Image (tube, rainbow, N blue to C red):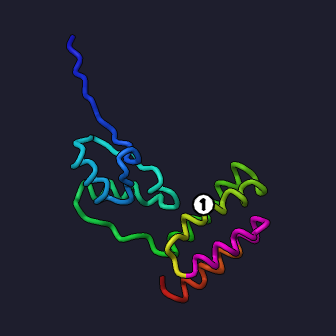
Amino acid sequence: MKLKVFLWIVVYAYLLYAIVVDGPSAAALMEQTGCGAVMVGRGAQGNPWIFPQIRHYLATGEVLPPPTAMERYEQMLSHFEALLAYKGEYIGVREMRSHASWYTHGLYGSAALRERINRAGSADEFRAIVRDMMDKARRAGT
């Protein structure tokens, strides 16, 4: 019986000073190195959409639109609830502060939002802050 061995080279982009942040950057890295896969590290922080975006780009060559502010806030709340279930309120609220920074990066008013989130002392306070921003995003149509 013959065994065929397939060698997939996975590129850890950090070593190449290249960060995979979307489909085009993943495709470019694969093209440049000839690798069969790339690892996504920091590009996924606060951006769980990166994986379907890369998959879609590699399959079609089309760039998907970025998530809306509302989608980002909804995902952040979902992440927060999962974190609370896993680690409890005290740790969950504190750990979510750094995640919230990634989720809100680049959004209008995100610096003020992060300041408010960093002061949140309870899960209810955190939720109220994010829901307030969601209401503002709804009114702005983003």
Q: Quadrant of the N terminus?
A: top left
* Closer to us: 70 or 31: 31
Residue 9 against residue 109 in the figure, above or below: above
* Closer to us: 41 or 1: 41
Residue 128 against residue 103 in the figure, above or below: below
Q: In the figure, residue 50 lies in which quadrant?
A: bottom left
Residue at the image position 48 percent from the left and 61 percent from the top: 47
Q: Position of residue 42 (x, y in %)?
A: 47, 54
Q: In the figure, residue 61 lies in which quadrant?
A: bottom left
Q: Residue furthest top?
A: 1
Q: Position of residue 98 (x, y in %)?
A: 63, 60
Q: Which residue is mark 1?
A: 99
Identity of the amino acid at label 1? His
Is residue 141 left or right of 10 when viewed as pictured?
A: right
Q: Is residue 92 magenta?
A: no
Q: Position of residue 136 (x, y in %)?
A: 59, 85
Residue 81 against residue 117 in the figure, above or below: above
Residue 18 against residue 101 in the figure, above or below: above
Q: Position of residue 17 (x, y in %)?
A: 37, 51
- Magenta stretch: dominant SS? helix
Is residue 18 left or right of 70 when viewed as pictured?
A: left
Q: Mark 1: which secondary structure?
A: helix
**Chain part drawn in magenta:** 109-127
Residue count near mark 1 (Cα–Cα under 10 Å), binned few <14, some 14–19, many ≥20: some
